[in-house]
Structures are given as structure tokens and as C-alpha cells.
Amino acid sequence: MLESQKPMSVFFHTKRATFFHALDPRTKILAIAAFFSIVAFTNNLYGLLGFLGIIVAFFYGAKSLENIGKMAGLFGIIGIMTFVLWLIFYNGPPGDAHIFAAAMSLRFIDLLLVGLLLLSITSLEEFSAGLMLLGLPYPVAFALSLSFRLVIVFVATGFTIVEAQKIRGNNVREGSILKRIRAYSPLLVPLILNAVKKAETLTLALESKGFSPKNKISLKGRYKMRPMDWIVLVVCLGAVGCMVMMTFHAHKG
Amino acid sequence: MITLKNLSFKYQQDHPAVLHNISLHINPGEKVLIVGKNGAGKSTLSKVLGGLAPGVERGIMDGLYFFEGKEVRLCPRAEIVRKISILFQDFEAQLVCSSVKEEMLFYLMNLGADYHQAEAEALKIARQFNITDLLGRDINELSGGEKQKIALFCLLTVNPEALILDEPFTDIEPDSQKHIADFLGSDAFGGALILFEQSLDYYRHFNRIVVLHEGAVLYDGGSGVVCNRDLLEKAGLDVPGPYKVFPSNAPIAFSNVKAGIGQLFEFEDMAYSAIVQEVPKKSIPVLEVKDLFFKYKGRPEYVLENINMTIRQGDFWVMLGPNGSGKTTLTKCIAGILKPTNGAVYYKGQKVKPGDIGYVFQNPDSQIFAETVFDEVAFSLRMKGEDEHEIRDKVKNVLAIMGLGEKSALDPFTLSKGDRQKVACASILVAEPEVIILDEPTTGLDFPSLREMMNIIKDLNERGKTILMITHSMEAAASFGDTVCAMSAGTVLFHGAPREFFTNEKLLSKAKAGRTDVMDLSLQLNGKLLLNMDEFSKCWKAKSP
């Protein structure tokens, strides 16, 4: 039997009234970019563990811990795969291999969690607006937001198609791997046809609503950087600065 | 304002023309209903009028199209979209944002309005049509009808000079249909309205009706055409409810229908008593829904609450209710597609499993994939590993029932929507389910296809199948259902006899349902409710000369 879930549950924005959700989209994007930089500069296992703790605390503060739950399985597999691969291909001192592999695995998971945090606290439109306010041209920002919207549509269509096939005895969640792969083939035709149809009508839909790449969209007055946004940005900038300094000193040492 | 001169259109050079030599003149603020069956050229004409074809949509046009004196193909696109708004038949394709609020702002902001202007306009429209609660939601959380409303209301934010709507009410509940049609048909909406429809259901909002047939204008004139049976029959259209009463072309205005019937017909009390005293058939329960609650994973609110019902073998239930009331979710729980959060559904005393019950989805294209109609219908039997000879016999039988016998070797994607709907239905029927659920099986079908589809469903019911049908068509509910199940906000308001439902004003209002013209007419005549034309013609007999 299918889980009681809707296609929407594969998307992560949690509509909650929290400090994190209330930040300006520019702040969210820049802060997340800062977090990415910090993780990218860190090789230390304990540092990465500490960062993991901070990110989980942020999820807690953003009342979005359920999103970690949703992705725990996938992230766990990615973590294990990364650990194993680094164990195999590590070419440093032999005794350090497992520590290094664990750090690399943790770094990957930290990066994924940072991305997930952004998706949890930012709606697609906020993300698009944030990019525009940071200087990205409107057509590019809109295209990015539209591509997410289309993913939602395709996933929703996919769910309906799976339901329709299941009623006819074609269950993609039962049987051997080979049987499951075969069960997927009847799903592909309607899915592809729906996608083609959607692509065909998209231009018409956009034109019918006045969209043009030459349009200038005014976001004036919609978003405002508040003192808290500036504080968050200064803290993030400070953290990145510290990390760069520490890395520089570590290499020098 | 709009002038078409000898306009013809085809999609490709070597294809036949879809529109032939159309000439129309539409004045500012005029309300025009353009009707025709599937393939009459309505959607193409709507795109031409919307300035999208030829241009954004490829095609070859002969003749001229002027808007406010300017030839449209020479006008910049930006100028056209400011003045002409168009709603597509496939309204879902027209939704391009992920949240309702953004969607409501998108059009106006692309025309250059700043955020605050666009937001104020969107709020105004949302308040006017009582959809402010939808503004905070994501598009993919909405029901089909709610999406159709949003797609339509987005266009109103720009206050267009001409509003073109291609079948805008297919998924919207009757109460809202009326509210929207009343507004658009009145002077409160100052722009011209061009409504494309497959039926004459909304004729009373228009004093000009254009009938399209095979890409050409068959009639352009006043609403008197609703009495012209011969012309409507030629165009594949149904005569609107009250006019079905009269035997032939009766040039009679709606306001005079009541008087006309009074003069020509007399009421037979005996026939009425027989109808209302009809004893419902008793049979064994086939489905039981017990204390059912349902919520989607990760969502706090229940979509269905405390549902209890018993459905008996051979019953014909029609599920009614406002958009987003939980009809589809409930039927998916009943079919075992969704697992209830609490409570259970029992099919013949056992917990229901997927496959126990047949389920025909609203959009046939969600399930069609095979290369031929035969293979599509045979799929579920092959999945069960049945013998090919048996499969051939069963498929042949079902295709004959559905009237698809001649089309078994055809590619299902080349068929009309009506036929694709029949293929989807046949592919469920072939597994011989005792209970069949149909989710709005007549949406988007023209009158001939609709009549054919409903006759097939009725025939299945008469063969002993238990039917649950979701519909927004009050006519279908009153003509075919023996039980109405009315829902609102995730609860069942009522399940019982249609006559009881349609006489209960409070229920009708809560379920955002309404009476058909025939029902209203029967009540106006003598206060006795007749549900459909069949009952009407049994009770109102022509006076002997």
C-alpha cells in the first residue's frame, strides 16, 4: 500500500514562523554560501562534527527537523559510500585513513545538510527573489524557480501514474529488482508524454501572462534587510574569516 | 473592438484547416458565448483571439484579425497581453509559480506593476471570490478545481479589455461556477467576455451566442438558438434543460417556459406518486468505511475526519462537494490507494487491498502507455498471468461494451479524449471489479461523448456493478445516482436519496451544490421536485387536444 504522502512531501520548505524563516532571502543565500565555504575549508573531523551539531541545532531552531528525518536514509548511504571510497583511495599515512575517510564523509553530509537547511527555510519564490536582489538577471532567476516548479509537477504526475498502474496490478514497490525495473516501463510513456505536453504549452503559458526575458520585475519594498540580517551576515563573514585564517596558519605551520 | 474578417487557420501547410472563413465583430464589454463540440475549433479560435496563434503557437492564418482597429499580428506582444487575457482549457499548464500568491502576482508584475500594486490587486480579487485562505498555499497542494479558479482569477488581476476563457468551469463546483459566471456576465466586469464552452449551460448569462461547427460559424445571434433543436443537433450540442420539455423547435424565452408548460402540459399526480414512492433496492453491503481519518504524512491537519458509510452491491453513489473537500482522497482510501491514518475500509468484510476495486482516474493520460487499444486493455490481465486466449475473449467483450471494438488495433494516443477516457475505463473493467470508482469521468467531454460515457456507466450499474462517481455535474448526479454523498471540509455532510438532498437548501449551500434548471422549473411549476428529464416527462404529459 502506498504511504500516506502527497508529492508535496518530497519538497522541503517548511512554512513556520521562526527566526530563520524570517530572514531576508539575500541573508539566507549569503549565509548558506558562508556555511558552504566553512565546510569546504575544514578537514578536521572534530571541527566537522561540531559544525554538524550547529547545523542540527539550526534545523531545530527552524522547526524543520522532519526534513533531516526524510533524508536520513539517503544521506546515510551517501556517507557510508564516501567513507568506503576514501578508505580505498586514501594515499596518506596508513594509520590516518579511517580518520580522513570519516572526515570526508562528514564533510559531504555537512554540505548536504547546509543545502537542505536553505531549502527548508526558503520558498522557491524567495530563493528566486534573493538571487535577483543579489544581481542575477530576472530571466535566469525565474528559470531556476520554474525548473523547481516543473520538478514538482513531474513528481506529482509520477505519483498519479504510479497509483493508476498499481490499481491495474503493476506495483513498482514489490518483487525482485528485475521485476521492479520492468514494472517501471509502463510508467515512463505517460510520464514522458506529460513532460513533452508540459514543455509544449510552457511557452504559451508564459507568453499568455506577459512574461518576456526583457521584463524588469520590481521587487521594491517587498524585502527589507533588517538589523538582524546584518548581524547574521557579519557573524557569517567573521566565521569565514576565522576559518580562512586558521586554514592559512595550519598550512603555514 | 475585435474584428475577424474571413479568418482561416491551419497548424501546418499540408494539414486541413481548423478554422474556415470566420468573420466576427465583438464590441467592447460584449459578452459572447461560443459553443461547439470537441474538434469544432474552439481552442484554436481562442488562441487566435488571444494573439497566441499564429506566433507563439505555429500555424498559418489567412484573413485578418483586428483589435481596436490594429492588426494583431503587427502589434507588439506586450501590447496584446495588457489588453487580452486568455485562460487555456489545460489550466494546469498555465500555472507557472509554486505558490498561489506568487501566481496571483506574476501576470501583473510582468506587466510592470510593482509588488505593492500587484499584491493589492491580488488581494482585492481574492476577497471578491472568497479565496483569501488559498493565498498562503502552494499550487501543488490545491485540488483541480482550486487550481482552475486560481488560473482564472490571475487573469482578472490585470482587468483585461477582453477576457477569453476556454472551458473555465470544468473542475469548479457549481456554486462557484454560478458566482463567477454572474460576475463576468454582468456590467461589474467591464471588459468583453468570450467564453468557449461545449454546452449551452451558461446561455442565460449571454445575449449573443456563436455556434461553431467543423471550424466554421454555424450560427451567430441571440440566445433564441437554445430552442433550435435541429441546429443544435447538427452541431452536436444538447438542448438546455427546460427546453428539452418541448417536442420541437419552440421559439420561447426562458422566462416564458413556465407559462408555456402550463398551457401545453398537465401534471399527473399518479406518476409523481409512483416516482417518489419508489422503494430502493435492498442488497448486501459490499464496502464499509469505519471511523476513517486521513492526513498526509508530515502535515498536521486531517484531510478526512470520522467518515462512516456503508455501500451496498449495485448502488450508484455520486460524490459531490466543493473543491478540496476530500472527495478524491476519500475514494482513493476506499480503493486502497491511500492508507487511512485511522479507521479502515472493508471490502466484503476484509480490509481493502489495491486491485480489489476498479479506479478510473480523471485524466486518462495518466495511465495509457501501450501501443494499441487492445494491449492497453489487456495489460492488467497479462500482469495477472492469464492465458492469452482468455485475455483475447475478455478484452474483446469489454471493448464491445465500451463501443471500442473497431478501434482495438489503433494507437490509443491518436483517439479523442472521449475515446481515451473509454479506453481507461475499459482497462479497469476488464479485470471485472465489482466496485468501480470514477473520478469525474465526463470532464472535458462534449455532449455526444458525455452521453455515451454516462450510458455505459449506467449500463454497468444495471449489470450489477457498484458505482462511485465523483462529479460536479448536478445533472449527472440527479439523472444517474441512487445515493448522493455530499462532502465538505473533509467530512461527509450527507449520504442518502438524491431527492432529499436536492430539497435541502442548507445542505445544497454547504456542499456548494445547486439544482438544475429542470429541478428549479419543476419546483416553480407546482412545488414538486423532479430530478431529471426522465421524471419530468413521466409527470408532465401533453394535454390532449
Image (spheres, helix red, strand yellow):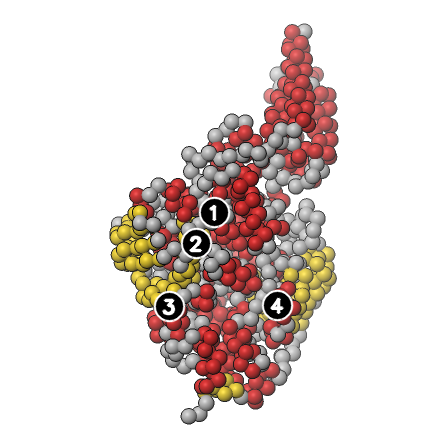
Judge whether B411 appears above or below B207 on screen: above
Q: Quadrant of residue B292?
A: bottom right
Which numbered disc, 2 or 3, marks the residue that appears first in the sequence? 2
Q: Chain of mark 2?
A: B
The reply to whether dot 1 and dot 4 touch (C-beta < 8 Å) is no
- Secondary structure under tag 3 reads loop
N-terminal of the two: label 1 or label 4? 1
Structural crowding at the residue carrying mark 2, measured as other residues with C-alpha within 10 Å and reported as few (<14), some (14–19) or many (≥20): many
**Residue to which mark 2 is pinned:** B191
Alpha-carbon span between mark 2 and mark 3: 20 Å
Disc 2/disc 1 C-alpha distance (Å):
11 Å
- Front residue of A15/A56: it is A15
- Disc on the earlier residue, 3 or 4: 3
Disc 3: host chain: B
The residue that mark 4 highlights is B508
Residue hosting label 1:
B158
SS at mark 1 in the image: loop
Looking at the image, which residue sits at the far top? A253
B331 and A31: which one is in front? A31
Left or right: residue B97 compared with residue B89: right
Q: Residues within 10 Å of mark 4 (few under 14, many from 20)?
A: some
- Residue drawn at x 55%, y 87% as measured from the top left: B271
Q: Residue furthest bottom?
A: B545
Labels 3 and 1 within one chain: yes
State the image coordinates of residue B205 (x, y, percent, origin top left).
46, 65
Question: Which dot, 3 or 4, sits closer to the camera?
Answer: 3
Crowding near the residue tagged with mark 3, few <14, some 14–19, many ≥20 C-alpha atoms within 10 Å: some
The residues tagged by marks 4 and 2 sit, at their Cα atoms, a distance apart of: 32 Å
